Image (cartoon, grey):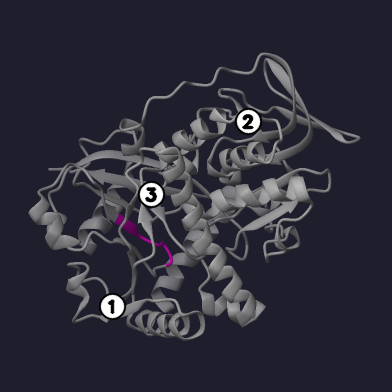
Amino acid sequence: MDKMDRMDTLSLWKATANSYDKGKPLEGNEEADVVIIGAGFTGLSSAYHLRKLGKSVIVLEQETIGYGASGRNGGMVLPGYKPTMQELAKKYGAEEARQLNNLSLLSVELVKNIIDEHQINCNFRKTGHIVAAYKAKHFEGLKHESEYLNKNFGYESSVLDRSQLHQEIDSPHYYGCLVDNSSYSFQPLNYAIGLGEAAKSIGAKIFEHSKALSIEYGQNRVKVVTEKGAVTAKDIIVATDGYSGKIMTELNKGVLPISARIIATEQLPETLLNTVIPKDRMVFDTSSFLYYFRRTPDNRIVFGGGDIRPNLGDAVYQSVYDAMVKIMPKLEGSKIDYRWGGFIGVTIDTFPVIGRSKEGAYFATGYTGHGASLSTLFGNLLAQWIVTGSAGGYRFEKERLKSFPFYNQKTMLVNIAHIGFKMLDIIA
């Protein structure tokens, strides 16, 4: 029997979303100190922190709060970045790598503090995570990374070899893992909704179903035009990441939207879950296609990753299911209740960017799978930049945002990346 027969396009997060006072579409003209395009984690965090700093704020969202990657991800609040700390140290120096590591830990703590302060109901739990080695040589790399973190940063992590792997995951697929206890899981859409409510509670205005059609730049003023209205402000933040389209040249050229697909199983027996992932850790692996998965509080497995090409239909979800069963054979026969997809924003060097366009628009983008934590922090950095004139001097400057070749042919670029990832998983 085809295990895809119960799938629909509703995400688990949408199906279990908290109710909230929906924002009306913008009608007429409004003014604010800052206008923000995008009501995901970055935009909502920017609005929240700008209000705390005394600025009036209007957020424009083309759909609903958390509609993009913020409400569609795997719900993993992780420290770190896509590049390893050893890679960052080699590129920027050991001291700067230490600062970047501390900043990523701060991003996780910031999410926790906001959730605690505003009592956001989003199943926020400290679970920790493991990084599973797709190949034997990847495990050697994880051992070196753990040693580097422990020795140079005093950062506690540990490794388990293949004979010990069953302590964390029942899988014949991996060669060992790195264990990190510092991460949390959550229901991402409910966090976005709660962050929006927190911003509104201190005076931010959020208009949903209000797509930004154009941005008009003037001297010390900017105007964002929607279908039924416009917002005039002194400053603008474009917080659209993988959903930017052509609203801003830098993002159109320098950010590649990569497709991500996720499935969620039916509710499973706890005895099965305690066998498959006994310590309830979140998991992601070292393959180029990056499979990631976790348990949920209502006893499901959420599993994502695989083929990054867009518009593949049902077949791509079947491939995600097949990967899940290959990695965790005991899940064979589990039915799938939910499936969904979205886009994440990726830069050429897979490292996030914060910057200001030549016209004066502030932006942050390129979290490459670490946006659940980093985007909240970057929203804070954008707010600080607007108010104080400095984002802290970290290595996220826009000069790193290099244009992709053939950036107007994004489907072709993603197809090329897909082939490259397949080759890397064979030879790397």
Is residue 67 among the parts visible in the rendering? yes
Tell me which segment is drawn in magenta. Answer: 288-293
Q: Residue at x 53, y 39 (%)?
A: 40
Q: Position of residue 372 (x, y in %)?
A: 47, 51
- Residue type at mark 3 is Gly
Q: Is residue 377 left or right of residue 190?
A: right
Residue to which mark 2 is pinned: 59
What is the three-letter code of the residue carrying label 2? Val
Q: Which residue is mark 3?
A: 75
Instruction: Residue at 20% x, 43% y: name it.
Output: 298
Mark 2 and mark 1 lie on one chain; the one further toward the N terminus is 2
Helix, strand or loop under label 2: strand
SS assignment for the magenta stretch, majority: loop
Q: Earlier in the sequence, mark 1 or mark 3?
A: 3
Q: Nearer the N terminus, badge 3 or badge 2? A: 2
Q: Are marks 1 and 3 in contact (CB under 8 Å)?
A: no
Residue shown at 39% from the left, 74% from the top: 426
**Mark 3 to mark 2: distance in Å?**
23 Å
Q: Nearer the viewer, mark 2 or mark 1?
A: 2
Amino acid identity at mark 1: Gly
For mark 3, does the 10 Å Cα neighbourhood hold few (<14), some (14 to 19), or many (20 or more) residues? many
Q: Secondary structure at mark 3?
A: loop
Residue that numbered label 1 is attached to: 176
In the rendered image, residue 380, in percent from the top left (x then y), is placed at 62, 49
Image point (23%, 63%), residue name: 327
Rate crowding at label 2 as few (under 14), some (14 to 19) or many (20 or more) other CA atoms within 10 Å.
many
